[in-house]
Image: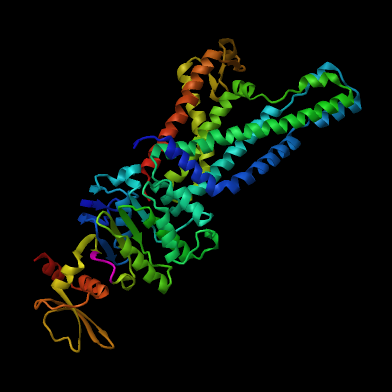
Amino acid sequence: MLNIYQLKFGYKAKQHLFEKLDLELSAGHIYGLLGKNGAGKSSLLRMMCGLVFPKEGSVEAFAFNPMQRHPAFLQQVFFVPEEVELPNLKIKQFAKINGAFYPGFDREKFNLLLTEFELNIDSHIKDLSYGQQKKVSISFAIATNAKLLLLDEPTNGLDIPSKAQLRKILAGHINEDSCIVISTHQVRDLDNLIDSIIILENGAIILNENTERITEKLAFKVLQQETSSNVLYAEPSLAGQLSVLENTRNEASKLDIELLFNAAIENKPEILRIFNN
Amino acid sequence: MNNTFSFYRLKLLFQKDWAENKKLYLLALPGLLILITLVYRTQSNFKFDINWIKEIHNTSQWYINDLEYQNEKIFFGGWFLTSLVAIFIRWNKLLTRKSLIDFLLLPATSTEKFIFNWLWIFLIPFFIYVILFQIVDFLFISSYIEKIKEANIPQLVEKLKYFNISHFIQNGWYALGYLTIIFSALLLSPFIFKKYSILKGILIIPVFSYLLNLFSDKLLKYLYPFQHGVNGLYFSISIRLPQHIENEGFLQEYSLSENHKILIGLILFGTVPILIWLANWYKIKEKQI
């Protein structure tokens, strides 16, 4: 669905954010894009929808070059930035005038999503809180039936019940023709939703794997002592040492995205070795 | 799907803009009417002239001939202000990062987005302004004619003419062309400057005025190498004749022929705005954020 090949990009001439970055995204998946502050997550999302252009290399999304911002491409991709700004309209007017740009826009689906988010379509956007406006924006993005949905920190500004609603809605939206990329720091908000994880570090992708393969290769355990030689990363908690281990015994464990991220950052060579084998 | 231009998508851009800003536009209409009326009130001294002539009983033809009704100048000043307001409204929609992202990611081509902006800066405000100005002008002139009749100075009626847009364009096309260049340059501002684009955009006016003067000066010097001084904006050239050189005498001013004016006008006001518009279209196409 989306291929990035040998991407070189930077905001300054001599300082590159990405060097020879390769990435392939497939339809039917929800990708979690993780990285430290300034790792280039938002830039990568903006590159995918054509808001910034690579210096070298190529980006291709369903046979389009995003740089050209072709209307047929823009109708199939929707980017929800971290901070949304909606016009001073009623929600239904907003949907009417903006939905007309997207041939796949499903008004009934939009209404349904609003109901799930406990929003009234007749409400005026200016009367909504920031979190509610974000829900309108996300609902609209989903209702466009865009093939590629790019969400930058979608849970920022959402209350706890809304985060659960968002997970449910996104899980219901994904199908074999579409792909969702979520850039986030709040990994716990999207636990059980993301099925593939991309970790960006120093301009390179150090991990791009589906959760199944991750739990096949790594085990996430609470150890009383850091005794095992397989421990790749551990951090203390009240229950004991939250640990990431190489899964040499094929044990089943529940993926902890935050632990995985910390392990990938702290013990990059080992993580690369395990997944490149 | 049409890759370059679609009237349907252009219509959608207008529908969206109208829905989002109709309150502002509808408020701008009476605002514009008030502005034109105020400019008329402050700039037009015809009412004063009527009273003055009436008081001094000086209805001699030479005095009346000196009176000049200023509605074309008022029209020009008002149009300048209207276009500036239109540009500020458009800037407001493009200045923030979020609004620019929305604009760039709307499923429409750069050509459609450029044409949409262009129409909102040049054509639509101009037509609306012309209509409103004609209304104000009609009301003012009709009231002056009534006053003239009351004052019994029929000679003054000849001096009053309702504003005629085609007469204005025929006589003031170079002024329209000049402002078109300035406004075209202003339209570029949000796409060129990342920071302080309003301030930098405002600075464009004197910078472009200077560059325009320089360009027209060079153009005239190139086309008429014999002259001493030129004034490209008004298409006049000044020549220091040989007999004057000895005495370091004065400059003789000549105006270009109509054909030459049209030729230079086409080069100056035809090509420069088109080049700026092309740059604007390119910036919309290539803008990164």
Q: Is residue B167 left or right of residue A91?
A: right
Q: Is residue B282 magenta?
A: no
Q: Which residue is at 64% across, 34% downward?
A: B77
Examine the rendered structure and indicate whether residue A18 appears above or below residue A253: above
User: How was the colour assigned to the protein in this rendering?
Assistant: rainbow
- Which of the two residues, B5 or B73, is positioned nearer the viewer here? B5
- Which of the two residues, A243 or A89, is positioned nearer the viewer here? A89
User: Would residue A96 be seen by someone viewing this image from the given angle?
Assistant: yes
Using the rendered view, name the quadrant where residue B115 is placed.
Answer: top left
Q: Which residues are magenta?
A: A192-199
Using the rendered view, name the quadrant where residue A19 is placed.
Answer: bottom left
Q: Is residue B144 left or right of residue B171?
A: right
Q: How many marks?
A: 0
Using the rendered view, name the quadrant where residue B85 is placed.
Answer: top right
Q: Position of residue B30 (x, y in %)?
A: 67, 43
Q: Position of residue A224 (x, y in %)?
A: 20, 89
Farthest residue to the top: give it. Answer: B243
Q: Quadrant of the C terminus of chain A?
A: bottom left
Q: Is residue A198 magenta?
A: yes
- Which of the two residues, A32 or A231, is positioned nearer the viewer here? A32
Examine the rendered structure and indicate whether residue A203 appears above or below residue B32: below
Q: Position of residue B212 (x, y in %)?
A: 50, 30
Q: Position of residue B83 (x, y in %)?
A: 58, 38
Q: Is residue A83 left or right of residue B153?
A: left
Q: Is residue A240 left or right of residue B74?
A: left
Farthest residue to the front: give it. Answer: A108
User: Would residue B206 be seen by someone viewing this image from the given angle?
Assistant: no
